[in-house]
Each structure stands twice: as C-alpha cells, then as structure tokens.
Amino acid sequence: MSKLNRVVIETGSKKVFASALDWPGWSRSGKTEQAALASLADYAERYQAIATIAGGGDVGRIARDLEVVEHSQGSGATDFGVPDRVAQCEYEPMSETECERQVALLQACWRYFDDVASRVSAELRKGPRGGGRDRDAIIDHVIQSDRGYARYIGVRTPPFDSFDPDAIRAHRDAVLATLPQLRNGEPIRPKAWPLRYYIRRAAWHLLDHAWEMEDKDLSKQAS
C-alpha cells in the first residue's frame, strides 16, 4: 500500500483496461495488457494535475514501477470502452486516512472536469466521419452519468439541470456525505458498488471526457 502502485487488469475480447487502484481516474485501455499498461504510464504526466490538485504525489515515479495485483474477465462494456468489472480487491475496507485521500482525488477530478468544461470551445473537433459530441453534450452526459453512478452507492438525487451549479453542488455534497459510511467495503445491496469501485469508475468517466474535450478543443488548435 505504501508504494501506491497497484494496478488491476480487465480483459475483454477486443480491449484491455489497466486501472491504478490507488489513483482513481488514472485508467487507460489498449488492445493488449502490455499496450494498456504502456498507455497508463504514458498518461502519468497528464494525471499528475489531478494528484497535484488533491495534495501531491509523484505519479511519474509510480508509473515506472506499476504492479499488477489482479486480473478480471471483461464484458461487452469493456470492449465498448468502459472499465466495467469490480475487482475483488475493491471489496477491501478502507482506513479513514485512505478514504479521505481517495475522496480528495475524486474531488480533484470534479474540479478538473469543471475547469476544462469552462475553457474549451463549444464546438469540438469531430471524428474522421463527423462523429462525436460537442462540449455541452459531453457535459450533460457526464453530469447525468454521475447522478446515475451515485445510485449504486445509495445516493438518489432528484433530476436536475446539468448546467445548474447549485444542483450539481448539492448532488456532489450528497455523495461526499455518503462515501465515508461505505469504508467497510460492503455494497449497500446486491449489485451495488463497493466504495473503491464507485470512486474509480466515477473518476475515470470524468477524466476520460475531460481529456477528450481538451484533445478536441478547437480554440486551442486555432491558437
């Protein structure tokens, strides 16, 4: 635990995810396990911004010493591009200190996503066939997905506008109030998510789309 370099591997038929257990949101995919691990290491510099917001940690150093601690069989969702499987080690209880650290990283992902959303162009670069969402569609997708994810830990906020900052803050406050209650690692009901996986999945989704918006930002390309 002290090295904070643990990685779980999720293998589908077409895609493999490598996810850093102790750095939620730092999760990348590839066609093979080796490719996924290489992509994870390549994104260390980019993820460093999250670690810095949350209070520090040299992610680049950790990326040079990644340790795979568990493999799981993926699903169709894995091949679609989602880290879909809960690792067995994610049922482990968290200490109060570890929980506070992971929650701080999730909050850093929220902050990073909000910052990116505030500065990228409304229109984003499309794919080679014209596919892809623009900024506001991505924001709506991420915020509403976050609301859906929270149901897996027992947080049910009423429907709200994805562009209402007060409503978003209220939803996130409800999540933050709930997370410490789940430190024992036990899901609240069958098919619910343990705390570690909820944080990992929510953080991955925030960063995956934040980085997408950055990469497709037309205002940055124009400058």
Image (cartoon, rainbow, N blue to C red):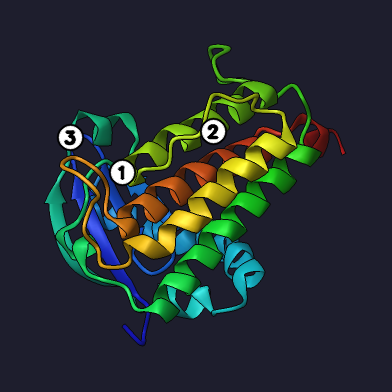
Q: CA distance from mark 3 to mark 1?
A: 9 Å
Q: Nearer the viewer, residue 207 or 55?
A: 55
Q: Can residue 148 be seen in the rendering of this structure? A: yes
Q: Residues within 10 Å of mark 3 (few under 14, many from 20)?
A: some
Tell me the quarter of the picture where residue 87 sits.
bottom left
Image quadrant where one finds the C terminus = top right
Amino acid found under the numbered disc labelled 2: Val
According to the picture, the residue beneath numbered tag 2 turns out to be: 142
The amino acid sitting under disc 1 is: Pro
Residue type, mark 3 in image: Ser
Tell me: 168 left or right of 61.
Answer: right
Identify which residue is drawn at 44% across, 55% down: 178
What residue is shown with label 1?
A: 83
Say the numbered circle drawn on residue 75: 3
Residue 172 appears at what percent x and percent y?
57, 47
Q: Would residue 162 appear left or right of 7 to someone viewing this image?
A: right
68, above or below 215, in the image? below
- How many numbered marks appear? 3
| Rendered residue at 56%/33% (across/down) | 143
